Each structure stands twice: as C-alpha cells, then as structure tokens.
Amino acid sequence: MSRIQDATLLITGGASGIGRLMAASALQKGAARVVLWDINKAGLDETVSELGDRVSGDVVDMSSAEQIREAATHLPSLDILINNAGIIVGKDFADHTAEDIDRTLGVNIRGPMHLASAVLPAMLDRGTGHIVNIASAAGIVAAPKLSAYSASKFAMVGFSDSLRLEMQRDDTGIRVTCVQPFYIHTGMFSGVTSPIIPIMKPDDAVRRIMKAIERDAAYLRMPALVKLGPFLKGVLPRPVFEFTAGKVFGIYDAMNGFRGRD
C-alpha cells in the first residue's frame, strides 16, 4: 500500500484541472511535499501560492526531453510520480499538422517516458516508489477526432503495463498504476457530450485516483462502464462492437462539439 501521508510527490500538469486537485488532495492526506510541473507559469505561480509552503513549482515543457532531464536533476527524492500533463487535438486526422502530431505525442507519451526514466534509478536504489500514469479510456476504445490523442493514450497503457511487469518480475518494490478515465468535466474537454456514459466530475475523479494510488491498483478504469471496454472489444465482432460504441453509447459522436480550452 502506498502512503500519501509524509510522501513527496511530483505532479505534472499541476497548475490546473485534476493536477491541481490531486495536489490539494495529497496535502489534505498529509503529504510532506508536492512538486508541480507545468508549462503555464501564471497558473503554476497562482496554484503554488494558494496551496501553501509544502508546494513548489517549476515551469517545464513536457514535450522537451532536455527540459525534463534538466528539471529532474533538481527534484527531491520522490515517493510518487504522477504523469498527468496532457494535451488534446480534437479534429480529423486529415486536418492534423505535423506540429499537432509531434506535440501531442511529445507531451502525452514521450515526456512521461523520459520523466519516468529520469526518476526510476533513484527509486530502484531505494527499493520503493510509485509511478502513476494518467492515460484515458481513449486508450481502450478509439473514436473519431482523437487520432493523435488516442494513439498517445494507447501508448501510455502499453508503457504502463510493460514497466509494471518489469518492476514485478524483479521484485523492485516499485508500483505502477495506469488510470484510464472517460472524459472529465474540465476545460480540456469543453464541448464534449456523452448520452450514456457520464462525464466525470473532477472531484470524483481525483478521489478515485488517490484511492487507487493508496491501494497500489494496477488499473483504474472509470466510471464503471469503462471497465466493459476491453471485454466488449474482445468478444464482439467488430461491426457489432462499433455499432454498440457508436450508436448505443454515442462514443463516436462525443467530440462533434469539442471546443477545448479557450
């Protein structure tokens, strides 16, 4: 069981959204120190000021391996890393630019892998640590207008599984949790609609994430209907599954009104 009380955490994408809420929750649970990384300096400064003296922040672009490696040299000894930073490009793949593709994959998967690589040696030396990767239900079931985003989240799931299995095989004491939420009601997903699967409230999502960390869960798929995704994909013929996902659950139309952050 991972203890948040007295732990030191790093949360990327910590200036807003669920990153900010996870930081506040960790402090409420008695974390000794929380380090926040974000590219938004103004938002980061505001969050650090509001959360108090157990919180510090650094401006880091998660698409830059160089910035990640440099910033990691100044980190304290970490108990928990939460790879939360992410971006979304909500449009058809034919309309993606090279920059859209590179930045989405950079922030959403290459950055988390570079960061995990940077902090893992110290965790291995201590024989303890917890890496939490925030993926997405879009890493289980793809949908239109999510090509680069979904690709990055499928990759995050695969990375998490492989890393977890390596840590288990070698009995390292390091846990890996992969979080696969449906859409969460934050600015990042503004304009998204879902007729059947509920769009999650940020507070509820964070409560579940923190509980999963404390339980050392390998996966957190939320809300409950998301847990059906891997099973249905495995047992249903492709046309039946796509009819169910698209016409019954409305997943394939969810991004039609997407606006994202202003």
Image: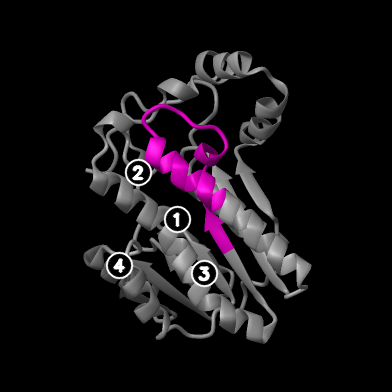
Q: Which is closer to the viewer, label 4 or label 3?
A: 3
Residues at marks 4 and 1, CA–CA distance in whole angstroms: 22 Å
Q: Pointers 2 and 3 in contact (CB under 8 A)?
A: no
Which numbered disc covers residue 44? 4
Residue drawn at x 36%, y 30% as measured from the top left: 145
Q: Which amino acid does label 4 sit on?
A: Leu
Q: Residue 146 colored magenta?
A: yes
Residue 120, by quadrant, is bottom right
Residues at marks 2 and 3, CA–CA distance in whole angstroms: 21 Å
Q: Residues within 10 Å of mark 1 (few under 14, many from 20)?
A: many
List x then y, in percent, for residue 28.
54, 68
Left or right relative to 107: residue 213: right
Q: Which is closer to the viewer, label 2 or label 3?
A: 3
Which numbered disc covers residue 109? 1
Q: Pointers 4 and 1 in contact (CB under 8 A)?
A: no
Residue extent of the magenta highlight? 132-157
List x then y, in percent, for residue 127.
70, 81
Q: Earlier in the sequence, mark 4 or mark 3?
A: 4
Residue drawn at x 65%, y 35% as measured from the top left: 224
